[in-house]
Each structure stands twice: as structure tokens, then as C-alpha cells.
Image (cartoon, helix red, strand yellow):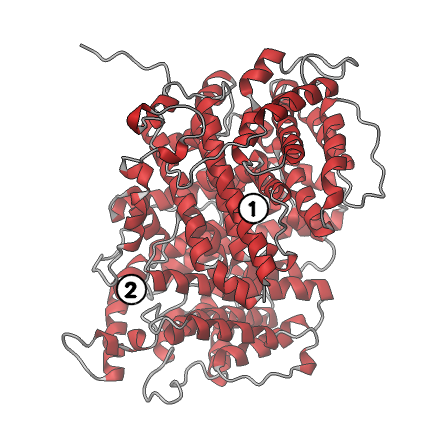
Amino acid sequence: MAKPRSKQPFELPDFYVPWPARLNPHLEAARVHSKAWARELGIIGAPADGSAPVIWSEAKFDAMDYALLCAYTHPEAPSLELDLITDWYVWVFYFDDHFLEVYKKTRDQAGAKAYLDRLPLFMPVDLSVASPPPSNPVERGLADLWARTVPSRSVDWRRRFFESTQSLLDESTWELANISERRVSNPIEYIEMRRKVGGAPWSADLVEHAVSAEVPDRIAASRPMRVLKDTFSDAVHLRNDLFSYEREIMEEGELANCVLVVERFLGTETQRSANLVNEILTSRLQQFENTVVTELPSLFAEHAITPVEQAQVLTYVRGLQDWQSGGHEWHLRSSRYMNKGAVQKEEALPLGLSGLGLSAARLPRTPGALGLGRIKAFTHAPYLPVGPVTLPKFHMPYTTSPSPHLDAARRHSKEWARSMGMLDALPGVPGAVIWDDHIFDVADVALCGALIHPDASPTELNLTAGWLVWGTYADDYFPALYGHSKDMAGAKVFNARLTAFMPDDPSTQGAVATNPVERGLADLWARTVATLTPNSKRLFRKAIQDMTESWLWELANQIQNRIPDPVDYVEMRRKTFGSDLTMSLSRLAHGDAIPMEIFHTRPIRALENSAADYACLTNDVFSYQKEIEFEGELNNGVLVVQRFLDTDKARAVEVVNDLMTARMKQFEHIVATELSQLVRNFNLDADAKEKLQRYVTKLQTWMAGVLKWHQTVDRYKEFELRAARGRALRYVGPTGLGTSAARIASLFGGGRTGPRLP
């Protein structure tokens, strides 16, 4: 007999909730206050001035119970603070539903833009600036809440809160555009954009207010603090997507839901997609935990964070944990979500106990609820024979051909590398080299420069090739010196010294270079920045620093023998690949014709990230055997997908290629549908418009050049890898069982023996 079909589209998975939820004792007072406030603002029922339709009835407001959400997510907030936080959440959910009803359902993109453009006027960072009179419940609520919230906070916090609130408001048009086009985003795009439109970074900022503990501004933008906010945000949103799938997809016609995104991308049925989304959620929570334990202590020491400031940061961290657990409890109970039977399933307590506030008494009984999946991230065995990859058919709509100055660039780049000492033996280790002539020639980095910059003058191409040679050599030198020894302290000192070789005035260089990396950087920096504006120098320096600092992240993964979390991997891979470095060179070529604000807009950031991801994943496919079998590496996208999906190499390569294709199609979609609007929004003149188009063309050429270089050179082919291993053994001498540590690659790093930069 056939099993009756469940009314729900899937069964909710077993959630990993590592921290018990607690309930604020001021819940009832917050319920009374928030209803009165919402009624006064016109949020319940129709506003008296007719400025909005009826979005929520009183019964609907009561059933959603946002006071319960805030009482769970902010269990220690005083009564007045809980009232304020609850009003913010009433406002933000009302904004979401109001925008859906008035603009999404009507597909009114012009009206939506005009509406959203007004809202920042009600959030002045400078409190002396007056706001205009509000004209609807959303504006009235925002003006009231801003005035009650920000005066007690620092300017730095106000600025962060303004930015996260504006992102939440502005990027609503992204969802609207996708609905209008019936377009489902790709997984990488979705995670990035969901953070902005979903509002969890905004929630994280409110946590600081609720617990009265600001993160010190000097570390607020650091990787550990950024990762804590991002992992918090992703977990909040992915949990919401699981609970809201039925309402959003089957009732409201939404397309911004990760379960749907995974369904479409992997072609899996809904239950399997929901389970995978829950695994991503779990992985993000475990990334949060890993960051707290492994990255915060050194962050505190390196930035001289005082004991009082450390206590504030840890109070903030606890606030984020409370939000995760409390948000889960609310989703189990709110009428807004698909949760039939979920409370009973999770509240299977001993001794017949039941009711609110007993989440700490639950005993997780499944591998998913216990978070045991984290174990597989630490079980990688290095140097396993994996064999060569069968290359897929790559989607590449753009073409390129080498610069006519290629041969001269090859000669110049090799002479330059030799003059910097990159082809010399390491001091004190006879016969030990990072590069020799053969390794340099096989890599043929100048070819990559000639393919990604085919219209360059001889001088420009020499500079491009020089930066690629430097980045590639530095990326090899770093693991060779610090990887095998797991010397994180030495690696941080090495990285910190590099900034000294990028002064504002290169003629005042004071530091003395002690190795080829420092010598090469000092030379290239002086040749590149002589004519740059101070702001351009700052941005270019930041691109280089982001790349070199990302190698510390790779080293940390090696030390832990931890295959990265998939989301963390994608976002850090752009940095380890040096994408921003090469893109910055293209930006600088356009001078001031293109306003710098253009490069901070969503369309351009999405273009650049799509291009970077395509190139990074290209390298991961081609270098899989080289890195996994010959170098003991675990920072590789194919391996990340293979381990996350519990699949084989062939299927993992297929998924990575599908991601590359999706990112390329997103790139094409932005060029076709969004750039013209961007030009109009910024009122670009003909010169700026032409240079923007040239920049986009350079990104297209860059992607085509990176792929063609990988297809052309021998460095990733098995015969070259085996020959390189033989040469390494001959350099050091010993052979046979037990001598792998004597290979030059292992002796000086156990890491890559060739570039990660193309």
C-alpha cells in the first residue's frame, strides 16, 4: 500500500544546535509594548493616513510573535532594551512583507528603487542631520527606531549599523529582479546575496547593542570577526530557508531560497536538497566554533586587545550564540513557518518534561544533531595517489591570443627573476631550490601574462609578467619555508615584513630585503606606484596584503589537517589566487575616469567575484593531482566538494565545472542586463562608459587567458609531476622507504612545488 504523501514538501532535518536556548523573563512586557508600538505606527491594520495597504492583521501579528523571537535571541536584555530590539524586528519583518506586497508582487522595479532610495535619509550617522518627514509606516518606524538606538553608540558602530541596514534595504531589488526574470541564482551568488538581503549582519550589529558590548573598531574588519559575523549570518539564513521553503516557494512565488537553489543546481529531489542545506548550515556553525577557538586568541594578542575589550568581544560572541539557539526555538513555534511536528520531535525529553525553556535538557540522538559530520573534515590523508583528472568541457564564451611581445616578456621575466635570486639555491642548504630554470620554463608565467593582457605595450607586459612571477614564486616560497615546520609565528613575521616594502614614497625605502620575495616586491612596487594617487596606492597595497595574508589561512588549515568549510573556501580562494592583485592592475590603468564608487556596487563586485571564482576553480581542477597526490595539499576546491558531498573525484570535478559554468553565466547575465542601468545610475559620461566597458572586456580576457594558460602548459601533467618528484629526490639524496621527508618539497614545506597564481 502506498504511503500517504506528506503535506509538507520535505521532512525537517536534524539540526545541529550546539548551545541551549534561554528565554528572557521580560517576554510578556515586550509583547504588550511591541503591539502598542506597531498599532501606533500603522503596522497593524491599515495606517490612518492610507499610506500603505493592510499587510498584517492583529491576529497575524499575534501568531508571528516577534516578541518571542527576541526574548529567545536576547535572553539577558533588560526590559527596555528588549522592547527596543523587538520593535526593530517587528519593523524589519514588516518591511519585508510590505516590500513583497507592494513591489515584488507588482514587479514595480522603478517604484521599488524610489522607495528604497529614501530610506537611508532616516538613518543619519551624524545626528545633527535632520531627516525628512516620514510618509509611510516603514519610514515612520525607521525614524523612530534610529533615534532610540544610535545616540548611545560610537560613531564606528553607527557606521557599521548604517551599512548593514542599507544593504538589507538596497539589495531587495536583487530579489525583485530575479522574480521578474524567473531566475534562480547559483549557490555561490545566493550565499553572498542572502547575507545582504536576509538581514543577519544587521542582527549581529544589534547584538552588540543588546549586550552593551561593542567590538573594538581596530579589529572589527579583521578576518576572525568578519568570519564570526558571516557564519552567524549564513546559519541564520539557511535555517530560515529550511523552515520557510513551503511558504516562500509554494505560496509566495519566491525564488530566493537555498533549498530551491540546491535543487536546481544539483538536480536533486527536495528532501536531499534540504538535507544538504542543513549540512551547509552545520558546517557554518562549526566554522564559527573553529574561529572562536583557533583565531581569536592570536587576534587578541596581535592587536593588544585589553582584558576589558576581550570580555566585550566574548560577550558579543555569546550573544551571537544565543541568537542562533533562540532563533531556532522561535522557528519551531512561529506560525510564519513550516514546523508541524517539529516541536514534538525536538522536545522528546526525559521523564515526560515539556514546555518552554527546556531546550538545554534535550539530548541530541542523531549524528546530524550531534554535529559528527565535522570529523570528516579532519580525516584527510596526504599524498594519496589520486591519478590525473579527466578534464571536463569548460564553458568559455570569450577568446584571447598571446601578445606579440611574449618572447621578449619571457626573456625579461626570467632575467628579472634571476636578478632577484629566485633561481638561486636557498642559503645554507646546498642544492635546495624553490625554482630552477626548468621549473621556471615549465610554468611559463609570462605566457599567462601575455594571454590575460594581450594588448599591453612591452613595458606594461613586462610589469604584468613580473607581478605574476613574484606572486607565483612567493606562493611557493611561503609553504616551503613554513608549511612542513608548521611555523605559524615565523609565517606571520614573514608576512608582516612585506608591508615595509610597499611605502607611500618608494624612494624612502628603509627596510633591507633579506630574500627574493622582499627584493621582488620592493622592485615591482616602486615601478608600479610612482604615478598613482594616494588612494590608488592604498587599494593596491590592500590587494597585495589580502593575498599574502590568505596564505596564513592555508597554513592554519594544514596545521589542523582540516579541509575547509565550502563557503569559507570559496571566499578565501579568491585571495589565495591573487585575483584582486591582477584586477587592481586593470583598475589602475583607467585612472580617475571611472568613479571608484562603481567598484563597490553590487553588479561590479558580482562581476569580479564571478570572474575570480571561474579562474580559481579552473586552477583547482587542473592542479588536483599535483596538489593532492604530489604535494600533500588540502586547500583545493575539488577536494572540498568531494569531501562535502561524499562523492568520488569524477563527480566532484563535474560539480566544480558546473559551478564554473554557473559563475560564467552569471557574469554574462550581469553584462547583458545590469551594466546599462549602472551607467545610468551614475550618469557616466562617454569616456567613463567606454573605460568601464574596457574593464569588463579585460575581465573577460582574463578568464579566457587563465583557462588557456592551464590548457597549454605542462606543469599540471603527470609526466612533469613525476619528473619533478625525481629531481627533488636527486637534490637531497636519500631514496627508499621512510625518506619522503627528505624531498626538497617536504623538507621545506610539504606544500606546493609550483604556483597557485596563474
**Category of crowding for the residue at label 1, using alpha-carbon neighbours closer than 10 angstroms: few (below 14), some (14–19), many (at least 20):** many
- Residue shown at 57% from the left, 71% from the top: 463
Q: Is 757 left, or right, of 366 in this rendering?
A: right
Nearer-the-camera pick, 242 or 512: 242
Residue 97, by quadrant, is top right
Mark 2 and mark 1 lie on one chain; the one further toward the N terminus is: 1
| Amino acid, disc 1 | Leu
Q: Which residue is mark 2?
A: 632
Q: Position of residue 92 (x, y in %)?
A: 63, 29
In the rendered image, residue 350, in percent from the top left (x then y), is placed at: 29, 29
Most distant residue in the front direction = 351
Tell me the amino acid under the disc marked 2. Answer: Gly
Quadrant of the image for the N terminus? top left
- Residue 453's image quarter? bottom right
Q: Describe the element under mark 2 as helix, strand or loop.
A: loop
Q: Which residue is mark 1?
A: 607
Q: Foreground residue, 157 or 431?
A: 157
Mark 2 closeness class: few <14, some 14–19, many ≥20 residues within 10 Å: many
Residue at x 67%, y 64% (from the top left corner): 538
Q: Quadrant of residue 75?
A: top right
Q: Quadrant of the C terminus?
A: bottom left
* Image spot of residue 242 (x, y percent): 42, 29
Residue found at the far top of this picture: 1
Q: Secondary structure at mark 1?
A: helix
Depicted 2 relative to depicted 400: above or below: above
Quick check: can you spot residue 309? yes
